[in-house]
């Protein structure tokens, strides 16, 4: 019976982790995505909060039964690892992990175009000009931040990409 419970705990843990990991793998910044991959990711993201919670509750019930039947810490270690993974998946399913890597750029630094050695002539930029003041935001930088909080010619702006 312990072997069956162990297998069930392993399956619930793997299923829970996959519900969170598959969208992370399919939707990655700067990697081409397919319409099918996006559809799968959004479907999994929509069901994962409830599914991971159910799997966590079921898995914790199984883990508790197994825990009581184990006598050494070596037997309890895989149960503890599975429990942590189940809890982590349930929490991560409720997070928007895509926002973790994209933070607004609160204090952008600027240099004259001739001194901008990190921007090549072939790089795309988002440009704006307000009352004679100009700014250029490299797309390669904006792709990570998506937002720049900025004041140009006394006008507060949020520049987005």
Image: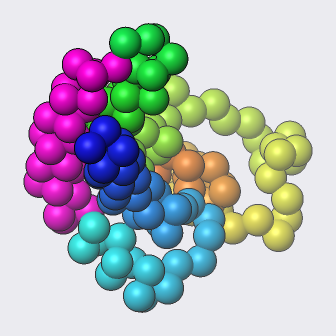
Q: Nearer the viewer, residue 50 or 10?
A: 10
Quarter of the image with the C terminus is bottom left
Residue 123: give x, y in percent of width and height: 76, 65
Find residue 160 and report its image quarter: bottom left
Q: Residue at x 45, y 11 (%)?
A: 73
Q: Nearer the viewer, residue 52 or 49?
A: 52
Colour scheme of this structure image?
rainbow
Left or right side of 42 for 140: right
Find residue 28 and report its image quarter: bottom right
- Range of residues picked out in magenta: 45-70
Left or right side of 112 for 12: left
Q: Residue at x 63, y 31 (%)?
A: 109
Please say whether residue 96 is visible from this viewpoint: no
Q: Nearer the viewer, residue 80 or 156?
A: 80
Q: Residue at x 49, y 85 (%)?
A: 34
Residue 100: give x, y in percent of width and height: 42, 39
State whether the magenta stretch is mostly helix, strand or loop.
helix
Quarter of the image with the N terminus is top left
Left or right side of 61 for 5: right
Q: Residue at x 27, y 29 (%)?
A: 66
């Amino acid at each position: 019976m312990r072997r069956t419970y162990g297998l069930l705990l392993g399956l619930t843990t793997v299923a829970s982790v996959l519900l969170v990991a598959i969208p992370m793998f399919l939707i990655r910044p700067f990697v081409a995505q397919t319409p099918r991959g996006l559809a799968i990711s959004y479907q999994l993201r929509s069901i994962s909060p409830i599914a991971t919670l159910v799997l966590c509750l079921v898995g914790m019930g199984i883990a508790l039964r197994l825990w009581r039947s184990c006598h050494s810490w070596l037997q309890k270690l895989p149960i503890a690892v599975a429990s942590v993974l189940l809890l982590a998946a349930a929490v991560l399913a409720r997070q928007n992990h895509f926002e973790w890597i994209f933070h607004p750029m609160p204090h952008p630094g600027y240099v004259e175009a001739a001194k901008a050695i990190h921007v090549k002539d072939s790089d795309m930029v988002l440009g704006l000009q307000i009352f004679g003041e100009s700014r250029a935001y490299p797309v390669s930088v904006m792709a990570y931040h998506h937002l720049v909080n900025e004041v140009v010619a006394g006008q507060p702006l949020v520049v987005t990409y």
